[in-house]
């Protein structure tokens, strides 16, 4: 477990995504998370693998028509749109980045789903919603930018007792060097935890652990696939977005490979 990294500020995160959003949509698509391959022989495309991740998390969330779901750290909305389409649930996405919220709402209007899927600017550590406002929530690789303990407590507060909370997050499978930790910090990332440390964190937050699984064997291709795409688009992105894009791309081309943990949790009090 690492504890000495500096937690990113809201300004750090927003500044990072001002450029990173453009970089990620170009090299990876509209969903800013890992892909999931069934086996080493699985020849799924990057897009198919990314959609499979969303299918996996949607199944674990168990939302249905009439439910109200919080998408914590929603990006530009792609997973929220898919969740609403598949389950019939109403989805509210939140992000600390104004540009992402504006783009996500623009896309909701373009798709004609703005009455069921909407997006608001909000701080995950101080959510502006009453207790028990949601039937379920998920956070897809968004806690990587947050102070996790208060973020988890807020999720437990706004999700009704017994409601499910599904999280996918980065995982430290092998010890990281100081240089690798510094590199991750440059991406406005919070400290990355081992699986044992993650279980302890969740339990101390007061949430009930239903499932905690290291899925890295299914997601490990993501780093190499993303790096290949970053190389192909490097010159174009630097020309359009300058040195800040080069910095983001440099991190994506780095040798730091992290695992992925999927946590299925239950809000206390049922």
Image: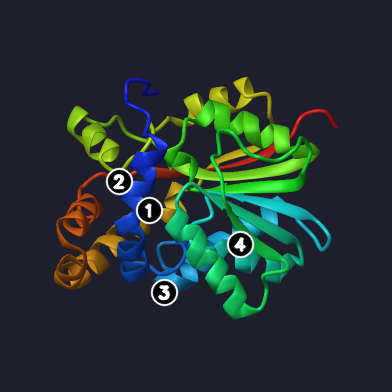
Report the disc number at residue 220: 1
Residue 61: percent from the left, percent from the top?
Answer: 70, 51
Q: Which image quadrant for residue 189?
A: top left
The answer to which of 176 and 122 lies nearer the viewer is 122
Q: Is residue 187 visible?
A: yes
Q: Earlier in the sequence, mark 4 or mark 2?
A: 4
Q: Is residue 127 above or below residue 52?
A: above
Residue 44: percent from the left, percent from the top?
Answer: 44, 73
Q: Earlier in the sequence, mark 2 or mark 1?
A: 1
Check the picture and name the quadrant holding the C terminus: top right
> Does the CB distance between marks 2 and 1 fall below 8 Å?
yes
Q: Which residue is mark 2?
A: 257
Q: Earlier in the sequence, mark 1 or mark 4?
A: 4
The answer to which of 168 and 75 lies nearer the viewer is 75
Q: Which residue is mark 4?
A: 80
Q: Earlier in the sequence, mark 3 or mark 1?
A: 3
Q: Earlier in the sequence, mark 3 or mark 2?
A: 3
Q: Residues within 10 Å of mark 2 (few under 14, many from 20)?
A: some
In front: label 4 or label 2: 4
Q: Residues within 10 Å of mark 4 (few under 14, many from 20)?
A: many
Report the disc number at residue 45: 3
3D distance between C-alphas at marks 3 and 1: 14 Å
Element type where label 1 sits in the image = loop
Check the picture and name the quadrant holding the N terminus: top left
Element type where label 4 sits in the image = helix
């Amino acid at each position: 477990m690492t504890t000495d990294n500096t937690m990113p500020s809201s300004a750090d995160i927003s500044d990072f995504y001002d450029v990173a959003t453009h970089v990620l949509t170009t090299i990876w698509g509209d969903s800013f998370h890992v892909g999931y391959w069934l086996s080493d022989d699985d020849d799924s495309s990057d897009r198919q693998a990314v959609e499979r991740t969303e299918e996996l998390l949607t199944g674990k969330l168990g939302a249905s028509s009439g439910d109200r779901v919080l998408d914590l750290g929603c990006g530009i909305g792609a997973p929220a749109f898919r969740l609403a389409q598949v389950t019939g649930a109403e989805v509210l996405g939140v992000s600390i980045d104004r540009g992402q919220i504006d783009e996500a709402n623009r896309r909701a209007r373009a798709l004609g789903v703005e009455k069921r899927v909407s997006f608001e600017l909000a701080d995950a550590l101080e959510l502006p919603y009453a207790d028990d406002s949601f039937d379920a929530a998920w956070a897809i690789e968004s806690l990587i930018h947050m102070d996790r303990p208060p973020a988890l407590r807020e999720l437990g507060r706004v999700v009704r007792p017994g409601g499910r909370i599904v999280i996918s997050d980065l995982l430290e499978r092998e010890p990281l060097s100081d240089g690798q930790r510094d590199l991750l910090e440059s991406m406005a990332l919070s400290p990355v935890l081992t699986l044992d440390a993650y279980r302890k964190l969740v339990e101390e937050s007061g949430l009930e652990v239903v499932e905690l699984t290291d899925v890295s064997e299914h997601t490990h291709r993501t780093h190499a696939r993303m790096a290949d795409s970053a190389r192909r688009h490097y010159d174009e992105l630097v020309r359009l977005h300058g040195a800040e894009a080069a910095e983001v791309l440099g991190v994506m081309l780095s040798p730091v490979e992290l695992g992925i943990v999927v946590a299925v949790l239950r809000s206390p009090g049922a």
